[in-house]
Image (tube, grey):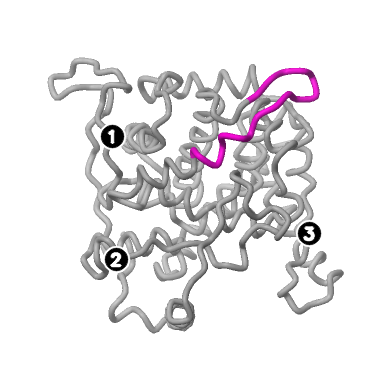
Amino acid sequence: MTVTTVPAQSPHTSPSGDRVEHAHAEPHPLGPDSLTWKYFGDLRTGMMGIWIGAIQNMYPELGAGVEQHSILLREPLQRVARSVYPIMGVVYDGSRAAETGAQIKQYHHTIKGVDSTGRRYHALNPETFYWAHATFFMLVIKVAEYFCGGLTEAEKRQLFDEHVQWYRMYGMSMRPVPASWEDFQEYWERVCRDELEINQATLDIFQIRIPKPKFVLMPTPVWDQLFKPLVAGQRWLAAGLFEPSVREKAGMRWTPGDEVVLRLFGKMVELAFLAVPDEIRLHPRALAAYRRAEGRDARDAPLIEAPRFTAPPSDRRGLPMHYFPPRKSIIERAGSLVHTTFSLAGLRSAWGPKKAA
């Protein structure tokens, strides 16, 4: 599979160059010609879990919602694994992307309250919801910059335009969305400098422990020792990827030597992934999208959902804030097992997508 990208028309300029407000543009989903498709579903974004978790939670309203409503600390692996499916879907679901966006929006209706300082919050506050989206956009920018060979200024502008197009799929107010890539950079710097704070939800991310899932057959002390260096490594990556103002708030130290090591590590990751097939490199929702776009699967093929074992704990099921993976039939589960087995064995190259450029 060869992925080609073409510059997307700016959602805030007309063909004649006249400014068009974000709110007046027609929503349409991203496709395989977008840079966002190329990078967002890449496995390398997983290395930035602590970065995105922390910088999202530092936004006061978002952090309060996580602290009072989330069960991330109770089941972090399952929580992240199941949430990523619909989040990916807003990019990769094609004509169904707006429906997926509405689904995600629905999960946030009941996430509201008053934080520890008496400030009211609601997850659907336009500024709060957009901040979460902005962090996903910057996740794409940073993974491409540090681990995928870098971006030109023209590509950054294209990704900015695509992130606006992507955000429309939620049906949210476009009021908080900056008008240009330059405006976005000013917005990002201002929020990082003036609005982000270190709160309990952020500290929980920095100090996170990954509980051993019940289905993992190894002693808990061994599991804990395996994950300690991985979490420490992600904290170090987060320190390097934070803006200086955020790093200072978090009390993190970063030296010129650290920056050199990070750049070298990023180049090693980039080279190593040249040998990683798409069946492993791409998230299942993204891989399925490419297959539909290439005509290998039907356009209306069922969307790939999270595995059932990532479902919320039994005492949380039925709450409107949770995505609950649908139950699959025996035939569907057997097909999924064959699909996964062939993928991991590298046996799909004859009929699956080829390496993306």
The foreground one among 69 and 342 is 69
Between marks 1 and 2 in the image, the one whose residue lies nearer the viewer: 1
Q: Tell me the CA gap for discs 3 and 2.
A: 37 Å
- Mark 3 or 2, nearer chain start: 3
Above or below for 14 versus 349: above
Q: Which residues are magenta?
A: 105-121
Q: Are marks 1 and 2 in contact (CB under 8 Å)?
A: no
Q: As displayed, is residue 310 above or below residue 152?
A: below
Query: Height in image: 264 above or below 55?
Result: below
Point out residue 173 in the picture as x, y percentages from the top left corner. 42, 24
Identify residue type, mark 1: Pro
Kindly identify the amino acid type of the residue bearing the numbered disc 3. Answer: Lys
Q: Residue at x 39, y 32 (%)?
A: 171
Amino acid identity at mark 2 = Arg
> Residue 118: within the magenta?
yes
The residue located at (40%, 46%) in the rendering is: 90
Across and down, in percent, residue 294 comes to: 22, 64
Which sits in the foreground, 323 or 167? 323
In the rendered view, would you say 46 is above or below 14?
below
